[in-house]
Image (cartoon, rainbow, N blue to C red):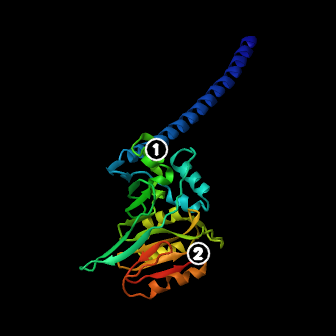
């Protein structure tokens, strides 16, 4: 009997580690299963919003397209990224929209003009021309959950999209590349009536370094369209950052709001103040060309050192 008892104890002792081992394996596989399920859900949501956005692309006219953006374009992430160079910007766009796939940009020199006027009813009208030599245009409709809805214009040539640049806009690749369009807009107007436009200048590109968080041109435009309701709010937001122009040239921003208040925001060397003086003193429509222009009944230049 004693021998049999020892054998039974031995068998039970051997079975306990086996059961424990099986439970550990089940836990590991269970954890892996949960992780895989979460990844599938996240990927499905991401792909769904991307596909939904791509499906909104339409051709409105020859060389003119529109997209209604249904995807989170991670503005807070862009603002926190301290982007200063074109390569850093492209890497952000690649990681955010294209799973790290490499991107190439085409930043041609432009010399656009902007203006503000009013009609007989006293309504303010803002506008700008588009002096790109070769590009198709994309009208970008955005409706962020934590910001203002807006309409912006993006030059598709900046990502080599369009008939003249080799990638057909309505092709699968062309539509996929348009997922970066919230950060391609060089002008736009939001639901509060705030308008912003990027204008190029001759001096070398602006690269501020005063210790403040960094921002580049395209992210600045997106920030203002999403989060500023007035010209004063827009200028105050811009003061919080060191500005870095996106192109190889200096850039400034023309801003106007629904109350008719306007500003041209400068970051270049202080001598540029003198270029704006005649228009700043004007009480009626004036134009400044250097080579960009800003025309308005009465506007001020805001220099951010």
Give the image location of residue 255, x and y in percent.
44, 73
Residue 78 shows in the view: yes
Give the image location of residue 132, x and y in percent.
45, 60
**Tally of numbered discs:** 2
Q: Alpha carbon of mark 2 to alpha carbon of mark 1: how far? A: 35 Å
Q: Which mark is residue 167?
A: 1
Closer-to-camera residue (253/167): 167
| Residue linked to disc 2 | 268
Q: Is residue 37 left or right of residue 122?
A: right
Query: Circle 2 sits in a helix, a strand or a loop, which is it?
Result: loop
Relative height, residue 278 to residue 35 (above, below):
below
Q: In which image quadrant can residue 142 be found?
A: bottom left
Residue 162 shows in the view: no
> Which numbered disc flags the more N-terminal residue, 2 or 1?
1
Closer-to-camera residue (137/218): 137
Q: Which mark is residue 88?
A: none
Closer-to-camera residue (100/77): 100
Relative height, residue 14 to residue 105 (above, below):
above
């Amino acid at each position: 009997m004693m021998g049999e008892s020892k054998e039974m104890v031995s068998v039970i002792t051997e079975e306990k580690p086996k059961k424990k081992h099986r439970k550990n394996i089940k836990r590991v596989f269970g954890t892996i299963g949960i992780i895989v399920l979460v990844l599938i859900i996240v990927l499905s949501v991401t792909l769904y919003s991307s596909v939904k956005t791509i499906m909104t692309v339409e051709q409105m006219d020859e060389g003119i397209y529109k997209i209604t953006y249904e995807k989170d374009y991670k503005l807070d992430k862009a603002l926190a990224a301290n982007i200063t160079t074109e390569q850093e910007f492209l890497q952000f766009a690649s990681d955010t929209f294209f799973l790290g796939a490499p991107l190439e940009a085409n930043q041609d020199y432009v010399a656009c003009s902007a203006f503000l006027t009013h009609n007989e009813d006293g309504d303010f009208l803002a506008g700008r021309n588009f002096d790109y030599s070769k590009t198709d245009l994309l009208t970008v409709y955005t409706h962020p959950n934590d910001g203002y809805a807006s309409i912006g214009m993006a030059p598709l040539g900046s990502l080599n999209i369009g008939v003249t640049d080799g990638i057909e806009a309505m092709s699968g690749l062309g539509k996929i590349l348009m997922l970066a369009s919230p950060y391609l807009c060089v002008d736009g107007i939001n639901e509060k009536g705030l308008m912003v436009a990027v204008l190029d200048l001759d001096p070398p590109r602006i690269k501020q370094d005063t210790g403040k968080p960094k921002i580049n041109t395209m992210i600045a435009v997106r920030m203002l369209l999403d989060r500023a309701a007035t010209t004063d709010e827009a200028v105050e937001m811009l003061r919080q950052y060191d500005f870095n122009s996106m192109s190889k040239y200096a850039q400034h921003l023309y801003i106007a709001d629904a109350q008719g208040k306007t500003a041209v925001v400068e970051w270049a060397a202080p001598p540029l103040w003198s270029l704006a003086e005649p228009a700043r003193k004007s009480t009626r429509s004036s134009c400044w060309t250097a080579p960009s222009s800003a025309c308005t009944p009465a506007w001020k230049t805001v220099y951010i050192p």
